[in-house]
Amino acid sequence: MPDTRLPPLPELLSAAVASVGGTERPGQARMASAVANAIRTGNHLAVQAGTGTGKSLAYLVPALRYAVEREATVVVSTATIALQRQLVDRDLPRLATALAGPLGRNPTFAILKGRRNYVCLHRLDSGAPEDPDDPVLFDPFAVSRLGREVTRLREWAAESETGDRDELVPGVGDQAWRQVSVSARECLGAARCPSGTDCFAERARAEAGRVDIVVTNHALLAINALQGYQVLPDHDLVIVDEAHDLVDRVTSAATAELTPAAVTAAARRCGRLIDQEIADRLVEAGDGYALLLADLPPGRLDTLPNALRTTLLAIRDSAHACISRLGPDRPGDLEAATTRKLALALLDEVHDTAVRLAEAFDTDDRGRRDVVWCSGTEAGNPRPPALRVAPLAVAGLLRERLFGTCTTVLTSATLTLGGTFDAMARQWGLPTTQAEGVKADGTATDKPPPAEGDDGPKWTGLDVGSPFEHDRSGILYVAKHLPPPGRDGLPPSYLDELAELIEASGGRTLGLFSSMRAAKQATEALRGRLSVPILCQGEDSTALLVTKFASDPATCLFGTLSLWQGVDVPGPSLQLVVVDRIPFPRPDDPLASARQRAVEARGGNGFLTVAATHAALLLAQGTGRLLRSTTDRGVVAILDPRLATARYGSFLRASLPNYWTTYDPEVTRAALRRLTAGSP
């Protein structure tokens, strides 16, 4: 029976904070209370909690109390592996120890990932099917490396208790991992598989169904919503951490790709199981598809050329014919069942994607739900051309399959863009009028109650602020005197400005660039001008580069998108964050441009709703790298003058913490020199 005599939340939170050697913070207490209220009322909650708030404890403590009290499972979803590991390896073990007494038993937790993340014991025994088109087969060095990696995987799997890829150190390449893992479509099923009782993926799912907290990722959360079957255990409460990334991760999970190689592989996979003539029709359709793609320029497709439509329908029909000829499964023949299942997985994927691509153009522009584009062999993308299809929006999916099925708490350090939750709410499918709105002093604006007759999900937006005093600890410098950025790389004036800032800072600089081309240009230009070491993303693993950067205060680190959100370097090694330009999506980005056009077709401001919102989120994430502890001090320097001069600049600035702002380069350099003089 549920235990209704558990200690009150403040008492549990105090015990939790003491267990990690911390001190209670007002923002943390407010957030914990709001999470408990959302659990009690069933209203959804969005919480912006700045770095240093202690938000993981603020949601885990009320979640554990609820799980123990109701004998229920709570799902916690994250965007990154790093946060998953923090929760499972650090936060939850400490909480389980600290709260075991007050809760009356040891709280339990587990991590759950997609099936492809676990070793498949049956595939280890039976071997992976060979793909004749795999270039590895024709490279003796690659074959040798692949063989060594697979051998190491076999040895590791024999000792591993979880079969989880992330626990393999050092890791292996994707090609090797595919030799020992299967997708959900390829899996025989626990009841049929000879290794079903020992299956790592099935054991992980079974354990997840018995624990209080299941930690998963946004991709699996999306799959649980998208697929017609349940992959997560029964639950009525979901906590989405790193919620600023939810829409992108769900969009990625809902994106499909059709390559000529996939069509050919599907035909060859089933070639020995059906009449060769039927399989050859699919091969011929794939060959025709490859010829058409070779002449198709990269970019978004607003109309589907007749020849391409005919070919997609031929792929659809040929794949369907192959599926039909495979016939039903034949019990008793395990090898045949495995071969059939692998063939069926590829055929289903090819068939379903061809259908989706063709049907994307069956309605007019206003009624379209999918965006289709050709990803070509342009610079930076060595893969052969393919058609990709992604949802124009995922708001309806989230509204129906997430908010419509369970109470949801969304949290991140960056959710209020332009000073409100409205931009994120629109993307999530929540009404932009909240049930209630609350702010911390100097942060997001209050919102009025919902209008009469509003039948959307009820939710509350809460900004609990940050323990950091941004106006005292950080300076926002906008280089208003520089020219607007162009398309031909960094102009000399930008490089001069960057060099002067780095010299004043004595290194200690994280350079965030809108493209790898710009990051490399700055690296090459400044290595010859400055005496401080400069590291550039791509020269080594990102984790190793960040470690080197953190260990030497004189070092600079330049990079692009992954560094905007993936660097946590508190202390004197980082006191200057430089952003070369406002990170708008590329004008030729197929998905962003289609979304922008859709907003404009409805009479809205497509640029502000899509492009500026994208830029605001990245700016907030990138500049958030500066202050990672209450003792940190430093400067955020934006070289793009449009942050100060353009009409949308006020929206972008309102998305950032309230740093003390200046446009004077000498004031900025003097502040950096003072910081450097006082740093170890």
Image (cartoon, rainbow, N blue to C red):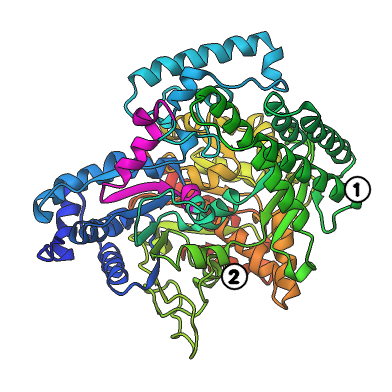
Can you say which quadrant of the picture contains the N terminus?
Answer: bottom left
Report x, y in % for residue 427. 56, 65
User: Does residue 214 show up magenta in the picture?
Assistant: yes
Task: Decide which of 490, 221 is in the foreground and name it.
Answer: 221
Compared to 168, does 145 lie above or below?
above
Task: Kindly identify the amino acid type of the residue bearing the numbered disc 1.
Answer: Ala
User: Does residue 485 show up magenta in the picture?
Assistant: no
Q: Residue at x 73, y 78 (%)?
A: 603
Relative side of 282 to 527, left or right:
right
**Element assignment for label 1:** helix
Furthest-bottom residue in this view: 452
Report x, y in % for residue 111. 35, 42
Compared to 3, does 495 lie above or below?
above
Compared to 181, does 671 lie above or below?
below
Relative side of 63 to 645, left or right:
left
Report x, y in % for residue 253. 57, 49
